[in-house]
């Protein structure tokens, strides 16, 4: 029963947030903004956001090399495409674990789960660094403090993680910690792979930042890049929290709050809704035939 409730919560919260967000929205104003968008800039932003797929695949390939698993880029790209609808649909980031299942013939699931946790921590680290840099460029001390605090939290987790393992009594938490530190203990002796993973993660989130810069521009808003660097990492971090499906609802709400005063609400909401539509609906639907084909072959 608890598991069923767990999977009902995110869709329910998504619908509630969307209702509260959209019930007073001027859809005519949003329609005007969307139809006034410059097609070539929208197309360019789409190409940039699609580049995140091969970058993510390259990061996964490098992550697997930590545990001495070498899978071709084409095979991993296929696995990533197959798992993409699950990543976006399954609540509580459970879809990320689909990658562990897809590579189970090459590596144990426990080890690859540790790699997924490592990538999640890298995501938080890079977003925190971007926020710190963006806050410094935009002269926003509060954002700098936010970025520094989360970086410090990650470092503290790594330093004190082994102690947490000794005192925790929760088996699920203990399993996750064991999986992570199994990977970390191997990675700390491979500085080149650490650098490569950081580079791929930075490129991944940089593509998102550039997407929003171009997307705002396509709707007539020349948003300063420093502002996007100081705001979007916080928005992206909020969307990583597993409270809605694929961040839908939380993204739009967060962007309206943090970009308030920098553009018209209709422009901010248009940018946010277009991103959710592309990343959470269009791309997963485009990948769905590959997922269905894979599942049929496995029957």
Image (cartoon, helix red, strand yellow):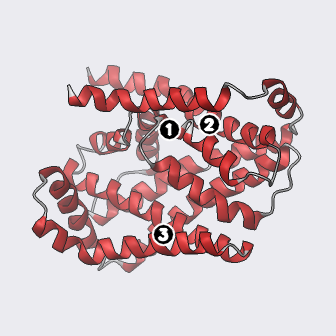
Q: Quadrant of the N terminus?
A: top left
Residue holding disc 2 = 276
In the rendered image, which quarter is residue 75 located in?
A: top left
- Where disc 3 sits, the SS reads helix
Give percent across and percent down for residue 138: 73, 72
Look at the picture and state if 99 lies above or below 62. above
Residue 285 position, x and y percent, is 54, 26
Whichever of callouts 1 and 3 sits on the residue coming sooner in the sequence is 3
The residue wearing badge 3 is: 198
Q: Picture coordinates of residue 204 (x, y %)?
A: 56, 57
Q: Which is nearer the eye, 108 or 23?
A: 23
Residue 70 visible in this rendered orientation of the protein: no
Q: Is residue 249 left or right of residue 86?
A: right
Q: Residues within 10 Å of mark 2 (few under 14, many from 20)?
A: some
Residue 298 percent coordinates (x, y): 28, 25
How far is mark 1 from mark 3, CA to CA? 23 Å
Question: What residue does disc 1 label?
Answer: 246
Q: Where is 251 relative to 65, above or below?
A: above
CB under 8 Å between discs 1 and 2: yes
What distance separates the C-alpha of mark 3 from that of mark 2? 26 Å
- Point out the image quarter for the C terminus: top left
- Residue occupying image coordinates x 69% and y 45%: 256
Name the residue located 55 percent from the left edge and 65 percent from the top edge.
Answer: 202
């Amino acid at each position: 029963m608890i598991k069923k409730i767990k999977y009902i919560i995110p869709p329910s919260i998504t619908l509630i947030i969307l209702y509260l967000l959209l019930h007073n929205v001027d859809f005519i104003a949003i329609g005007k903004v969307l139809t006034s968008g410059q097609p070539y800039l929208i197309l360019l932003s789409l190409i940039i956001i699609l580049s995140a797929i091969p970058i993510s695949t390259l990061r996964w390939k490098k992550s697997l090399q930590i545990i001495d698993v070498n899978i071709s880029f084409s095979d991993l790209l296929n696995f990533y495409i197959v798992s993409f609808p699950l990543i976006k649909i399954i609540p509580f980031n459970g879809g990320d674990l689909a990658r562990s299942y897809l590579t189970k013939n090459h590596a144990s699931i426990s080890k690859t789960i540790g790699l997924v946790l490592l990538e999640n921590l890298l995501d938080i680290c890079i977003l925190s660094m971007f926020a710190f840099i963006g806050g410094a460029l935009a002269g926003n001390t509060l954002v700098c403090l936010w970025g520094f605090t989360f970086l410090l939290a990650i470092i503290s987790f790594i330093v004190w993680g082994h102690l947490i393992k000794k005192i925790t009594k929760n088996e699920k938490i203990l399993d996750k910690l064991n999986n992570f530190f199994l990977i970390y203990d191997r990675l700390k002796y491979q500085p080149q792979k650490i650098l490569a993973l950081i580079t791929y993660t930075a490129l991944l989130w940089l593509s998102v930042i550039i997407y929003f810069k171009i997307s705002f521009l396509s709707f007539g808003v020349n948003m300063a890049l420093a502002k996007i660097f100081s705001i979007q990492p916080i928005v992206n971090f909020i969307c990583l929290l597993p409270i809605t499906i694929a961040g839908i609802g939380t993204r739009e709400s967060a962007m309206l709050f943090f970009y308030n005063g920098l553009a018209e609400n209709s422009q901010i909401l248009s940018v946010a809704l277009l991103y959710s539509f592309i990343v959470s609906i269009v791309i997963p639907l485009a990948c769905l035939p590959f997922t269905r084909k894979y599942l049929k072959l496995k029957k």
